[in-house]
Amino acid sequence: MDKVDLKALISAAADTIAAHAEELTTLDQAIGDGDHGLNMKRGFEAVRAEADQFAAKPLPDALKAIGTKLVMTVGGASGPLFGTLFMALGKEIFPEPDRANLATAFGKAIEAVAARGKSQVGQKTMLDVLYPVHEALLQGRIGPEIVAAADKAAEATVPMKALRGRASFLGDRSIGHMDAGARSTALLVRAVAETIEGHA
């Protein structure tokens, strides 16, 4: 991997979330609080506003700072979970990561999210996208294949029954809807993968 262009990644992530905020809200209205799109947009716009400061830091410190900012600004259940993902990634990643370190760090970050949310795969959450993406990384997949894995995994949450989060209160009525957190995770994976591909 070349040196990560953090400003480009932040911009791509914020643009993607902003472009899909309504879609995420609609998904969340079906089985959640209906605020996921707005919350995610607010959080990533807050990160974008400080992109210069984050980009000036070494990558591990930048990721931890971004995670902290997301916890403070996203709100809801998603803030702590997405924040934990970035903060844990920052603890494990090298200043100039190679692919092996990225895969290892990402795996540890996913474990931290699972512990924070007290959830696991198959419960209709963002973890249902994170684990397949990690698997694709471990298998040496390239950008478009990782994006495809993320999209397929988000789609696979539709027939699931929610066992964690607000949607779990709906029981069987949560079946037939895509999980908003899984969708936003897949969108972020696409933004990162396409930006890194474009700068490779």
Image (spheres, grey):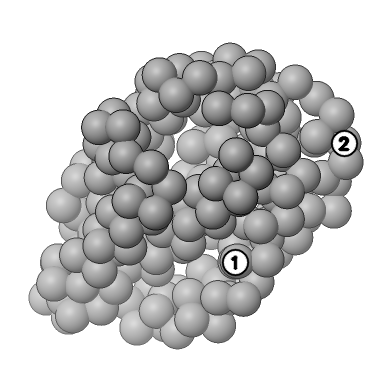
Decide if residue 81 is in sight here. Answer: yes
Quadrant of the image occupied by residue 149? bottom left
In the displayed structure, 118 sits above or below 169; it is: above
* Figure disc tally: 2
Location of the C terminus (image quadrant): top right
Q: Which mark is residue 72?
A: none
What amino acid does circle 1 point to?
Ile
First along the sequence among labels 2 and 1: 1
- Report if the CB atoms under discs 2 and 1 are less than 8 Å apart: no
In the depicted structure, whether residue 101 falls above or below residue 178: above
Give the quarter of the image for residue 135: top left
For the point 63% across and 28% down, the residue is 2
Provide residue 182's location: percent of width, then percent of height: 36, 60
In the image, 162 versus 94, the foreground residue is: 94
- Residue 108 at x, y percent in the picture: 38, 24
Q: Is residue 78 left or right of residue 5?
A: left
Q: Position of residue 184 (x, y in %)?
A: 46, 62
Quarter of the image for residue 17 reads: bottom right
Residue drawn at (42%, 76%), measured in percent from left and top? 28
Q: Quadrant of the N terminus?
A: top right
Q: Is residue 108 left or right of residue 172?
A: right
Which amino acid type is marked by label 2? Answer: Gln
Q: Residue at x 62, y 76 (%)?
A: 19
Residue under pointer 2: 53
Q: Nearer the viewer, residue 193 or 46?
A: 193
Q: Is label 1 in a helix, a strand or a loop?
A: helix
Can I make out residue 119 in this image? no
Query: What residue would you read off at disc 1?
Result: 17
Q: CA distance from mark 2 to mark 1?
A: 21 Å
Please give left or right for residue 199 compared with residue 173 in the image.
Answer: right
